[in-house]
Amino acid sequence: MSYGSHGLRVDCVKGGEDIKPSFVATDPADLPAVAPAALRTGLAKLGVSQRLANPQLWDAITTAILRQVVRADQARKLYRNWCSTYGTTVDGPFGSLAVAPDHTRVLSLPESSFASIGAKFHRTALQAAAEQYEQHHERWEHLDATALVTALTGIPRIGPWTARAAAADFTGDFSIYPHDDFAVRTWAAQIAPAYPWPDKKDKAFGPLWTGWAAGNHTALHTLTLATLTWGAHAS
């Protein structure tokens, strides 16, 4: 995938010619009206934004697993190393790009392969997910976001955070994203620094965040994804 003067270009690497990428629009007009004014003002400056939902469920699961117990910058480095070492490398208009190894490749890797790139901690989760994905992916790929979260939490070493992050990435529905995620909290505090946000160890952040949406999935999706989008531009 690349972005040039003619817009977004998406090329199939292998075996996914029938996959049609889905774009998710986020409009500041859908932000919950009761959210802090400073937060809404900061997010409104983004204007209407678009996100490409991950077209591959397996990649979304892989990405979420590799984000477990590591900082965001470490997770990005680990993911790129994982892809370049065991995935498929293709040439694009802006250079080479490596994509993640498929689930069958993950099942064939010995323990030493995970340890060699710093993914020893993630081995059991990745291989358990690969086994379950092989059996159930055709059904999983047609589930809505909430049902997909439930299905993924049935995998050993996949908890609610990982399941929600993967499901949001694949479906494009960020109303089910783990809203008390460190990234959400960090960017929200930077956008509206004067607001009395709960302490990082305080579990009140999640209920506060979802409460502003008052059950409106579109508002919660917009609030969460717009905040993450703001952070992606700021970092």
Image (cartoon, helix red, strand yellow):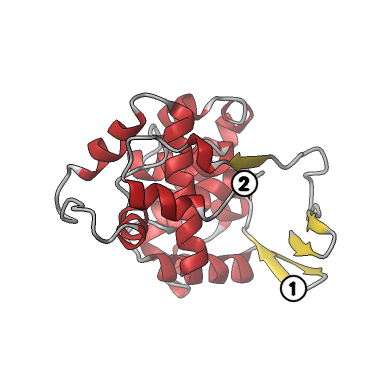
**Mark number for residue 154?**
none
**Which quadrant is home to the N terminus?**
bottom right
Dot 2 alpha-carbon crowd within 10 angstroms: few under 14, some 14 to 19, many 20 or more:
some
Q: Quadrant of residue 146?
A: top left
Distance Cα–Cα, label 2 vs label 1: 19 Å
Q: Which residue is mark 1?
A: 96
Say which residue appears at 81% left-offset and 37% top-offset. Answer: 18
Along the polypeptide, which appears first: circle 2 or circle 1?
Answer: 2
- Please name the amino acid that badge 2 sits on: Asn
Front position in the image: 189 or 124:
189
Q: Is residue 38 above or below residue 233?
A: above
- Please name the amino acid that badge 1 sits on: Ser
Q: Secondary structure at mark 2?
A: loop
- Residue 193 at x, y percent in the picture: 27, 61
- Residue 116 at x, y percent in the picture: 46, 74
Q: Secondary structure at mark 1?
A: strand
